[in-house]
Image: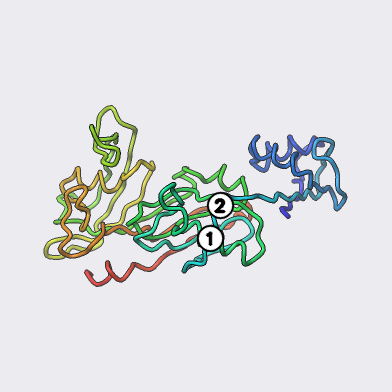
Amino acid sequence: MLKYIVKNNVKEQSAKDYLKRHENISSSLWKKIKKQDEFFLNGQKIRPTRAIVKPGDIIEYRIVEQSNVLPVNLPLTICYEDDYLLIADKPAGILTHPLTFEAENTLANAVMYHYQQTNQQIGCHPLYRLDRNTSGLVVFAKVGQIQHLLGNNHQLLKRYYLALVHGKLTMPNGTIDEPIGRSLNSIILHRVDKNGKNAITHYRTIKTYDDYSLIELNLETGRTHQIRVHMSYLNHPLLGDDLYGGKRNLISRHALHAYKLQFIHPFTHKEITIESQLPLDMQKLL
């Protein structure tokens, strides 16, 4: 049951107008609220479309969701969880979300099993996907507002990565502002393309080694393979990333880990910072 206390600085208005204007509820979520008809005003059940609210009123509603993602008992590392979202640490080698040809061995399956075991009747809503061989933090929304506010918003949800790249960068710190598009004759490969979509990556060198460097990156955009394409464009591909010119002699997958998230919680308004430890296959190279 989600709960809101109507703010003191608003006039009397319909619950619909209040929730959409002041609590960032989307039109699609309001339709779900109406359909479920589990809406309460000051503890009394009422039709959502008839509710008129004033400052200090308590709004509550419940949405029960069904999901097509199968719950599967798989290892799951939860780094943060509350009534509104869950943050899990994805290991390299598994998908974030099921595909037609791989429906059961994914991070989403593990999350749905956790929901089932804790009696949470909610859907599966990852805010973004990491590549199969990228490890690190993934946010799952439990309520529509989280997805509406934070999904694909790199200004509100700041995502930081650690990567090991070949060589030493001429400019230790910098910004790569180069559009990315799909490579010709490939459904997988992407490349820097002046006709592609806007893509901006910031990076800074943390430490250099004989043949490679440890760098931190954060994104202003979220294009497919963005970090991998941009670092290859600088002639410093990720270790292990043979798709974009990296060598696999030191590590068997591309050396990329989504290690930190920072955001202001849309409901509690607290600043949240979550970090994930670097996996052993990358640690051993430091």
Q: Is residue 167 left or right of residue 39?
A: left
In which quadrant is the N terminus drawn? bottom right
Residue shown at 57%/64% (left/top)?
114
**Spot occupied by residue 53 in the image (x, y as percentages of width and height):** 82, 41
**Which element type, helix, strand or loop, lies under badge 1?**
helix
Q: How many numbered tags mark residues here?
A: 2
Residue 163, which numbered label? none
Q: Residue furthest right?
A: 44
**Which element type, helix, strand or loop, lies under badge 2?**
loop
Residue 111, which numbered label? 1
Q: Is residue 7 above or below residue 26?
A: below
Residue shown at 27%/36% (left/top)?
178
Tell me the kind of residue under disc 1. Val
Residue 124, which numbered label? 2
Q: Earlier in the sequence, mark 1 or mark 2?
A: 1
Q: Is the residue marked by circle 2 packed among few (<14), some (14-19), or many (20+) residues within 10 Å?
A: many
Distance from disc 1 to disc 2, alpha carbons, whole Å, reads 8 Å
Tell me the kind of residue under disc 2. Cys
Marks 1 and 2 in Cβ contact (< 8 Å): yes
Q: Residue furthest top?
A: 195
**Spot occupied by residue 241 in the image (x, y as percentages of width and height):** 22, 53
> Quick one: 94 or 216, which is closer to the camera?
94
Residue shown at 23%/48% (left/top)?
231
